[in-house]
Image (cartoon, coloured by chain):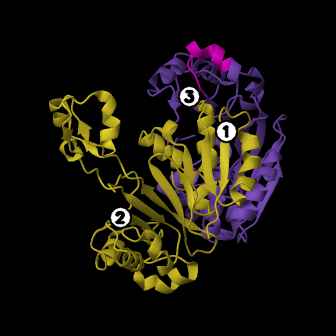
Chain colours: A purple, B yellow
């Protein structure tokens, strides 16, 4: 989970998100709209008798802020909360498991802030079931074949790995950048990602205001997408002044065609 | 405003509640589902440049919990927050203005908790416009006539006040009681109120669980309504297990017919 504004747990329930599978929360920066939902989420996990550890990756001050609330409202939680301090001013690996690596992306905002890059690890080669059956490959050989090994039949014939497998889907990369002013310094970190989420708080006629509040315009978000040659751009974090988001979308699309509006409760393919 | 759970400000926006008119928040007890929305609400008021004081009436610990969050997330708020400590274990007047008095109602819960009684003050008599015009009563006399004074014409005739006015609507009384176990001790405080909100977390088949967690069943809420001879009962605070609330409603109605289900975003006449 990335950031946790007020009401996040309510939306998760509405969308039937399986919260038991949520192990790590990454907090980009300590403004209320990115953290006020944490205490309610944690409190509800307690009532649901969650037992799995919950890891929170955030700037150090978050623990100081949350701890007294946890002691008061959530005593005797049946699970551990593990705080991991991140340094938002550097690009570095902050988490990895079997399938994914997560890196911080330093952003430019009024308080220390970072985005996150999620990078899938290369997958095993994809098995062609028919050929496995045809050559009677025993089950215990399959993991090795997925990793690219050839197969030697009982008769001693070597069958090339490419007979049994095809190249896997290339690993996907997703970058989340909010909140931030326009900053080309992020380009090397997000170069060529499949999907970029970039904030677009304002339209370009509010460029001065964007720069003053260290936010971006839709045109600026799209310019970053274009320069980083990303596959797809999702914009969001719109100022409340825009009832109709289509102006933002059109502005971004005029620079980077493959742009989508972030909408509440909508899923996007990466 | 009574209590402020997570997402309260979101619902208020959805319902176009004029938050500028919100001056006092009364917090029944310090469980998360009654307070987690406060920090977000206050933070948004700051961004909306509210200037009017905001009064929060709650147990003393709330200030201790909120203060560090306010300093961190809401520095330089353009308005004052004034905390008023309430003692949830006694029935006492905690607020009054020109039109209403508010009293605490001691409840029986796992932490110190109180309900609130809102009592309108008697209104002035209602003016009968036609008769005011007929006797050419000057405008400056009207406030006195509203208060029951007779009118003396230029000719010295005394016209009885009842010619110009009729009795006002009787003052309304509304009692809010959540969270609480069944407790007849509250009866003297809520006797004859026009409308009672009483929690009904469970149905009667979970009576043991209700008693253990210090909550009430729908039947118990209705019994209180019946014994206090209230005008109307609204039940709420349902356990998440009840997807269909009609069981709760029917159970309550079998004891007290004039019962209604509290529903999100619905308004009720008192």
- Relative depth, front residue between A72 and B76: B76
Q: What secondary structure is marked by label 2? A: strand
Q: Say what secondary structure mark 3 lies in.
A: loop
Badges 3 and 2: C-beta atoms under 8 Å apart? no
Instruction: Determine if residue B189 is in view.
Output: yes
| Residue B168 located left or right of residue B21 | left
Residue A128 lies, in percent from the top left, at 57, 55
Q: Residues within 10 Å of mark 1 (few under 14, many from 20)?
A: few
Q: Main secondary structure of the magenta part?
A: helix
- Part of the protein shown in magenta: A200-211
For the residues marked 1 and 2, what is the alpha-carbon distance in whole angstroms? 36 Å
Give the quadrant of residue A186: top right
The residue singled out by tag 2 in the image is: B261
Let me know if residue B4 appears in the view: no
Q: Earlier in the sequence, mark 1 or mark 2?
A: 1
Q: Residue at x 34, y 46 (%)?
A: B124
Q: Are marks 3 and 2 on the same chain?
A: no
- From the viewer's perspective, tell me whether residue B165 is left or right of residue B58: left
**Label 3 to label 2: alpha-carbon separation:** 36 Å
* Quadrant in which the C terminus of chain B is drawn: bottom left
Nearest-to-viewer mark from 3 and 1: 1
What residue does disc 3 label? A239
Rendered residue at 30%/75% (across/down): B256
Q: Which residue is mark 1?
A: B80
Determine the chain carrying the residue at label 1.
Answer: B
Asked if residue A105 lies in the magenta stretch, the reply is no
Give residue A26's position: percent from left, percent from top.
72, 47
- Mark number displayed over residue B206: none
- The mark lying in front, picked from 3 and 2, is 2
Return the chain for callout 2: B
Is there one chain holding both mark 1 and mark 2?
yes
């Amino acid at each position: 989970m990335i950031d946790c504004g007020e009401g996040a747990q309510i939306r998760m329930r509405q969308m039937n998100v399986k919260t038991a599978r949520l192990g790590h929360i990454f907090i980009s920066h300590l403004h209320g709209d990115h953290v006020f939902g944490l205490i309610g989420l944690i409190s509800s996990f307690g009532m649901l008798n969650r037992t799995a550890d919950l890891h929170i990756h955030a700037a150090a001050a978050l623990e100081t802020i949350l701890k007294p609330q946890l002691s008061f409202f959530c005593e005797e939680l049946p699970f551990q909360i593990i705080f991991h301090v991140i340094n938002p001013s550097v690009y570095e690996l902050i988490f990895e498991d079997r399938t994914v690596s997560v890196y911080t992306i330093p952003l430019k905002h009024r308080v220390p802030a970072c985005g996150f890059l999620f990078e899938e690890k290369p997958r095993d080669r994809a098995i062609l079931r028919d050929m496995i059956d045809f050559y009677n490959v025993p089950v215990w050989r399959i993991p090795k074949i997925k990793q690219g090994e050839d197969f030697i039949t009982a008769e001693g014939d070597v069958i090339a790995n490419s007979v049994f497998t095809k190249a896997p889907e290339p690993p996907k990369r997703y970058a989340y950048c909010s909140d931030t002013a326009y900053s080309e310094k992020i380009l090397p970190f997000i170069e060529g990602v499949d999907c970029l989420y970039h904030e677009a708080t304002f339209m370009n006629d509010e460029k001065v205001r964007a720069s003053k509040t260290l936010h971006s315009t839709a045109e600026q978000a799209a310019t970053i997408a274009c320069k980083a040659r990303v596959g797809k751009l999702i914009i969001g974090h719109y100022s409340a002044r825009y009832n109709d988001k289509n102006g933002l979308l059109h502005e971004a699309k005029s620079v980077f065609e493959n742009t989508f509006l972030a909408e509440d409760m909508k899923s996007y393919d990466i």
